[in-house]
Amino acid sequence: MKNVTIYKSALYIHKDSRRTIEEYILPAPIPFEVKQVKLVYLKQGKMVGNHYHPIISNRWELFISTGEVLFSYRYYTKVGITKELLNKGDICIIPPGYSHLFIAEDNKVCLLGMSNKIYNKDDAVVDILI
């Protein structure tokens, strides 16, 4: 069984009069072929997630945080909940079978999400972490 992995990425910001570029450098290879990319704009204090993707779905997810986000997760067997504060540039990789939940600490947070499969609501099982 694979576990949830959290990385502290290298973050570089480049600015000039035309634009600002934020670069998030992945510290390790992504363990899956990316099929879907999404931007999740979070509202302060609101929860997103509270579900898991069954092992049989083989859906992997990776999220990069652009700000402070409370990230909670546990294996679907419901044994213990781990809570981590993701900071700007932090990356979490979620294998199938792990419930996950995100709560933004402020209104200026976006999660860049990637997965190996296009989202299918039938592969998301509700699991209340909070």
Image: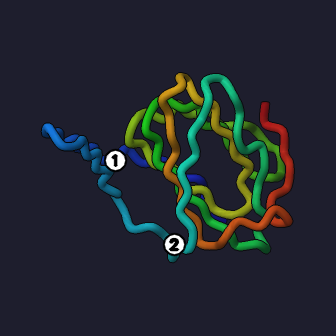
Residue 122 rendering spot, x and y as whole percentages? 85, 65
Q: In the rendered image, which quarter contains the N terminus?
A: bottom right
Horizontal arrangement in the rendering, residue 66 relative to residue 5 (left or right): left
Q: Which residue is mark 2?
A: 34
Horizontal arrangement in the rendering, residue 11 relative to residue 55 (left or right): left
Residue 73 rendering spot, x and y as whole percentages? 68, 43
For the residue labelled by badge 2, is the local secondary structure a helix, a strand or a loop?
Answer: loop
The answer to which quarter of the image holds residue 16 is: top left
Relative height, residue 24 to residue 42 (above, below): below
Relative height, residue 15 to residue 125 (above, below): above
The answer to which quarter of the image holds residue 26 is: bottom left
Asked whether the beta carbons under mark 2 and mark 1 sit within 8 Å of each other, the answer is no
| 3D distance between C-alphas at marks 2 and 1 | 19 Å
Residue drawn at x 47%, y 42% as measured from the top left: 65
Tag nearer the camera, 2 or 1: 2
| Residue lying farthest to the left in this orientation | 16
Q: In the rendered image, which quarter contains the C terminus?
A: top right
Q: What's under tag 1, amino acid-wise?
A: Ser
Horizontal arrangement in the rendering, residue 93 relative to residue 53 (left or right): left
Label at residue 56: none
User: Which is more toward the observer, 92 or 44?
Assistant: 44
Label at residue 9: 1
Residue 12 rendering spot, x and y as whole percentages? 22, 44
Residue drawn at x 58%, y 29% as measured from the top left: 104
How many neighbours does mark 1 have within 10 angstroms: few (below 14), some (14-19), or many (20 or more)? some
- Of the two numbered discs 2 and 1 on the same chain, state the one appearing first in sequence: 1
| Residue lying farthest to the front in this orientation | 18
Residue drawn at x 33%, y 57% as measured from the top left: 27
Q: What's under tag 2, amino acid-wise?
A: Val
